[in-house]
Image (spheres, rainbow, N blue to C red):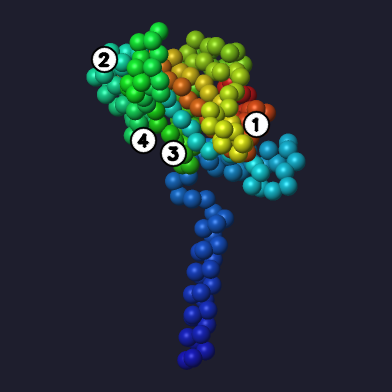
Amino acid sequence: MNSTKITIKNSLKQEKKDQVLGSFFFEKRGEALSEKYYKNVVIYDLLLKQNYTSIMQLPRLEKLVVNTTSKIYINEKKHIVFTLAALELISGQKPKLTYARKSIANFKVRQHQIIGCRVTLRENQLYTFLDKLSKIVFPRFRDYSKKKKQEKISSFFCKKKETNLYDKFAIEKGFFSVSFGFQNLMVFPELENHYELVDNFRGMDVSFVVSNSNSKLSSLVLSGFQLPFFA
């Protein structure tokens, strides 16, 4: 009897060990397709193209910032409510208001006035939004396949020159930001039946922040996700 109890305990311990080890090697539930693609394809592609001595040196998407600003919100603050709702529908996360850092007399902007809103996506929400861009939003553009590498396209535009973040600490740590913008927001499936929300929501910027990166590496990472303006 004692020997059978010991064998049962050992088998239970082994099952627990297998479950713990399996959680490290198997994919998480609810993992986005872009995240799986990054782990299974992009990482190996980067290892072949660059000479890394440690896996911690690999660049990865740290966060994605969706931002919109307009002078309409300065005079008519009620319009910011519709923009907040539209941005929440697109990103699936509650946005935050953005305020003017300093007064600008030419634009009639005072310090701490509301000038727009933004939302920061990380981890699973980041890759879920990236799935939406690559699988639904970008294929809806008529000029998606013909004008991939042009700087300006009729439906969306891209900043060809990548710009560093304003934070000096982030620059020292190797963070790099690449931005592009949308002019037509009706391509998002959440907004195509709600034109009243998009009436004053005329455009937005999307910024990818890549860690352990520079200009060349950030282009390699984003081209690995087959984005049209980096392919």
N-term-proximal mark, 1 vs 2: 2
N-term-proximal mark, 3 vs 2: 2
Disc on res. 125: 3
Spatial separation of the CA atoms under disc 2 and disc 4: 24 Å
Question: How many residues crowd around disc 1 within 10 Å: few (fewer than 14), some, or many (20 or more)?
Answer: some
Provide residue 33's location: percent of width, then percent of height: 51, 39
Secondary element type, mark 3 = helix
Image quarter of the C terminus: top right
N-term-proximal mark, 1 vs 3: 3
Amino acid type, residue under disc 3 in the picture: Gln
Q: Front-most of 220 and 95?
A: 95
Q: Front-most of 141 and 85?
A: 85
Residue at left 48%, top 44%?
A: 31
From the viewer's perspective, is the residue at label 2 or at label 4 nearer? 2
* Residue matched to label 4: 93
Amino acid type, residue under disc 1 in the picture: Asn
From the viewer's perspective, is the residue at label 1 or at label 3 nearer? 1
* Residue matched to label 2: 76
Residue at left 53%, top 79%?
A: 10
* Residue matched to label 1: 214
Spatial separation of the CA atoms under disc 4 and disc 1: 29 Å
Side (left or right) of 35 relative to 52 = left
Spatial separation of the CA atoms under disc 3 and disc 2: 31 Å
